[in-house]
Amino acid sequence: MNSFGIVFRVTIFGESHGPAIGVIIDGCPPGIAVKTDDFIPDLKRRQSGSRGTTRRQEPDLPEILSGVFDGVTTGAPVALITKNSDKISSDYDEFKNIPRPGHADFVSNVKHSGFSDMRGSGHFSGRITWGLVAAGVLAKKINGSTDINAKLISAGGSADIEKAINDAIASNDTIGGIIECRIKKPSLAIGEPFFYSFESAVSHMIFSIPAIKGIEFGRGFAAAAMKGSEHNDPFINNNGKTATNNAGGINGGITNGNEIIFRIVVKPTSSTGVDQTTLNFKTSEMTTLRVKGRHDTCIALRMPVIVEAATAIAMADLILIDRGIHGER
Amino acid sequence: MNSFGIVFRVTIFGESHGPAIGVIIDGCPPGIAVKTDDFIPDLKRRQSGSRGTTRRQEPDLPEILSGVFDGVTTGAPVALITKNSDKISSDYDEFKNIPRPGHADFVSNVKHSGFSDMRGSGHFSGRITWGLVAAGVLAKKINGSTDINAKLISAGGSADIEKAINDAIASNDTIGGIIECRIKKPSLAIGEPFFYSFESAVSHMIFSIPAIKGIEFGRGFAAAAMKGSEHNDPFINNNGKTATNNAGGINGGITNGNEIIFRIVVKPTSSTGVDQTTLNFKTSEMTTLRVKGRHDTCIALRMPVIVEAATAIAMADLILIDRGIHGER
Amino acid sequence: MNSFGIVFRVTIFGESHGPAIGVIIDGCPPGIAVKTDDFIPDLKRRQSGSRGTTRRQEPDLPEILSGVFDGVTTGAPVALITKNSDKISSDYDEFKNIPRPGHADFVSNVKHSGFSDMRGSGHFSGRITWGLVAAGVLAKKINGSTDINAKLISAGGSADIEKAINDAIASNDTIGGIIECRIKKPSLAIGEPFFYSFESAVSHMIFSIPAIKGIEFGRGFAAAAMKGSEHNDPFINNNGKTATNNAGGINGGITNGNEIIFRIVVKPTSSTGVDQTTLNFKTSEMTTLRVKGRHDTCIALRMPVIVEAATAIAMADLILIDRGIHGER
Amino acid sequence: MNSFGIVFRVTIFGESHGPAIGVIIDGCPPGIAVKTDDFIPDLKRRQSGSRGTTRRQEPDLPEILSGVFDGVTTGAPVALITKNSDKISSDYDEFKNIPRPGHADFVSNVKHSGFSDMRGSGHFSGRITWGLVAAGVLAKKINGSTDINAKLISAGGSADIEKAINDAIASNDTIGGIIECRIKKPSLAIGEPFFYSFESAVSHMIFSIPAIKGIEFGRGFAAAAMKGSEHNDPFINNNGKTATNNAGGINGGITNGNEIIFRIVVKPTSSTGVDQTTLNFKTSEMTTLRVKGRHDTCIALRMPVIVEAATAIAMADLILIDRGIHGER
């Protein structure tokens, strides 16, 4: 089930150490100006390199294989790929016998009856999110003047992100983080009752991203401790602007035109440098696992652009569905 | 978009004050024993009546219109309906002019160009979850010996739920709550990479339920403050049992056979008895709104069975997809 | 897989001798005027009663359960049902042992592991097309001024339909027929490359109708004997009008604005009054089967309105998809 | 809508003169042995070169980008591409002004608001069927011992295919043809009521192939002139074998285990060498069009392998859906 979307459809493929990874974007309206360079800024944001992120270096430049001609989308599916170049597969040989805690090694092996490509986590690698980010660049264009902005607001439980990462590096361990996404000037009245609410579409996409363990909209979990009279957002003008925004811009699963706000939690990177005691499935005995390879201290650092892309894709689909059923607003 | 599921498909219809509400369950395997009485326990759990819930009384008995013959499913779609009987529509006449804060009145009117049936929140009513619960009864049977159990673990921010509700009733206000769902003996290796992870499927369904504002799996938001070496769950036997269960039974979007754990937050009921100052869209002036009608002090009280149903439906779909691609395990 | 459509979605349920049959129409734009009486003319056309059709009499009046309020669609799913009243189930008891040639008895039993409701062919009954016709009434409204017109152009191989039917009745046998569907003023440029061409969408729907064994567009099978220079339709004005219309109004899977023309073949009714020698699966011996019950001499007589409905549904979906991706034309 | 399939999903992309064309195959079971060479025989059959086919020469070798590791499918999506090398785009410059009769030039321009890539018919090119054939190779493996065999049975209305093609070449014109597909040892009981009948799935796929104008199953259009007592196929053994096979192996939309037979018609190639009088949309005057470029005298010659692939894909999806709902048979 490597496709998402009903009208605007994104299909992902590739493995960490295969020849190439990529994405197909179907249902993309014709006439959208796009060139290879447009993908660079978001792809760079996703890349490794900053302190606390993996030292794997990939140029990650996209090749446009189809769907774009003379600098605009044609209406045919847009195919984008990038070659995998910086691969060191020998790191991963033992993970069939000793599945890494927190990783998909065990489940992937069971699910695919031992036929999974385990090199670099294969299709379960965070590298596959390259396609999400690339598709997100087009999806953002469909969202027009809507501004989708995600940022890391805490790491390792602290708002002092730099210090938290330095501490984690010092202890050879990894940490998680919380990302907040704010969407200004969203399309009004997108989201479909019953089963394709705004939150359903966005959470479906967001939980496709590896390492995400929770999402909350508006006040989220804090809403449980509020009174209805506090949590309700009274309307103050005919555009639907509300005095407060505890709902995070959504009522009944449909955008009400106010800023959309949600937060997600990213678990600490599973590939920690600390030794772990876990099972050797071959010998059925416990063993000490030291994970080698190149990994992120805090994968959450690279997540904001992925979260934006996932959100933009879900919203693009909701926009095209809404326009199909209701016409231009 | 009133359908959910790829192989096991649930379609919801109906409005709060229309003649009937219902659900179609397609892709249901033949040969499952089911009779009208099987639906009663879960439908009763969903019903109003206990302290803190609405006084609207509906018998809510299901009529099986199709798909069941001689006490077993036939393989044809199962259609279930129930009549709406206890309707007092006069309560809702003014909500086009003065959309209720926290409700879908405003967005529904915009989205559907003023043609929405606003009586009792129409298709946005919590009443529509009757169909979810009914479909959930069948979905639970497809889940076999898996035990899906949701319960309210706090209300209004307090673990003393009864007191919290009494306080809310006393102040004529409403409160939210947090529900925890635990799934014992889940099917192993369900969940599809990339876009139909276990969390994607379940969160998609869960956010279809009105009033839900967040979901977290395993340690959820608390994971952000953990180290990787703490959060990782080491394996301890060949069935994939782990020493800890911080991941809540899921790795890489796929069930690892351990208990599945997630929590959701339910916002306080929007229909509070406290006066609210909000816009009259007709006069463009602020006004005081007093919401009449019969409503729940704490809608979260009725939610556990709905959460179980939503979860069972998502899991049934994942089970049938997995069996389709991989055969019997 | 009892649903069709990507944005405009039709879900069918029911069995010939169950309590009721019905249809859910989702993705239906709000604001379409519709009342119960609007369904009567097409439902009457589908009904039995004329010479050569079954004597089963059903009032077939629709109940609107949801999605319509104050005489217009609301944007919520439209649910329509009709009760089954004129049921004589004793006719069908023996068909598990002696599956009727030409019917679905054998395959239905195998597919559903013996759990099928065999009464009146159950979910495989032509009666289930009631829901198609009902949904078609709404779909035609979405098609606006487009005129979809199907008619029987031959029966039993003869253009003298009345005589062919009289002959068949006289021999206690059944006959098939050919139906031509012509669509005037179709929406321009509907049909989606690659996999949802106009012909793909329409044929998918048409072959859902029981008893249909072929479809051809424009010149159809006769095109094989034409030269390219004869078959090509030259353009003669800027609206895309062509001098000839061998393509039947479709180029590259997309409507070109000219009249759409296709023909389908309906096989002779399987329930013939003539004795048939076939296997008794219980005894594994050949036996003589005399099919009792009430059946159509020429089911094709009742088909035109079903073909129109199926076509209108497919076209409504294509229209809403096209508007979603491309905006209003 | 460049994807087909519910569980086994095929997504096509590319244009005739773009950098590459390709296909993604998702929902492919793991553990299927496949290597690049396995694709060569069917891709060769699709290729040009024989008398009466275009002189465009492409090596057409597939690159496997993902989903295959150590010579077997992994369960992750299989991505296959091939580079376009032999491109002469100057041939196609004028077709925006003078859309070629029989081609998609006019509709593609309208649908995509003038943004289509018109070079070599762009995404509407028959070249895009490369991906179908490649996906068909995998789909055939999923069909196991089932033998899907399509062949051209007539061209230009004659069973003497070679003579018909020689005559067409001599007159500088093009001809169509009829292809028959026979499927021996098909899976029993595949095809889903109501909307995903065997014929619905197969015709949906078949009409995705450019130039196809009709399909008929079993006796097809000839059935209209038969009596029910002639057309019905009596059963003769407990496996469902029938004495005759007028139904072409399908009852009620479900395979009955007998040989499946259907025929399709391919229109004459639209790019005829004969001059055509058609509209110049720029000048609004009629003009004489001489189509240059390299084209097939009889495109039907290359179609059998495409028809087999389309059929195998539809059947693979039906097989996986059936196994999901009903388990292993």
Image: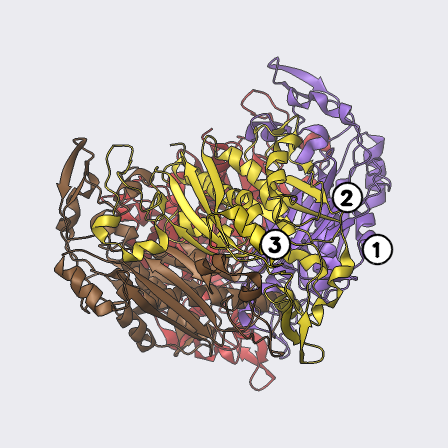
Chain colours: A brown, B yellow, C purple, D red
As drawn, B86 above or below A62: above
Amino acid under label 2? Thr
Alpha carbon separation for disc pair 1 and 3: 48 Å
Q: Secondary structure at mark 3?
A: helix
How crowded is the residue under tag 3: few (<14 C-alpha within 10 Å), some, or many (20+)?
Answer: some
Mark 1 residue element: helix
* Quadrant position of the N terminus of chain B in the picture: bottom right
Q: Position of residue D104 (x, y in %)?
A: 52, 68
Quick check: B260 left or right of C134? left
Q: Quadrant of residue A21?
A: bottom left
- Residue type (three-letter) at the residue carrying disc 3: Ile
Q: Judge if badges 1 and 3 mark residues of a common chain.
A: no
CA gap, disc 1 and disc 2: 14 Å
In the rendered image, residues at marks 3 and 2 fall on the same chain: no
In the rendered image, which residue does mark 3 sit on? B169
- Give the x, y percent position of residue B126: 62, 52
Residue A67 appears in view: no
Residue C128 in the image, given as x and y percentages of width and height: 71, 41
At a point 57% along the width and 31% down the height, the residue shown is B30
User: Along the line of sight, which residue is nearer the eye, B16 or B158?
Assistant: B158
Give the number of the disc on residue C37: 1
Which residue is identified by label 2? C82
Badges 1 and 2, same chain: yes
Chain of the residue that carries numbered disc 2 in the rendered image: C
What amino acid type should be assigned to the residue bearing mark 1? Asp
> Which is more foreground, mark 1 or mark 3?
3
Q: Nearer the viewer, mark 3 or mark 2?
A: 3
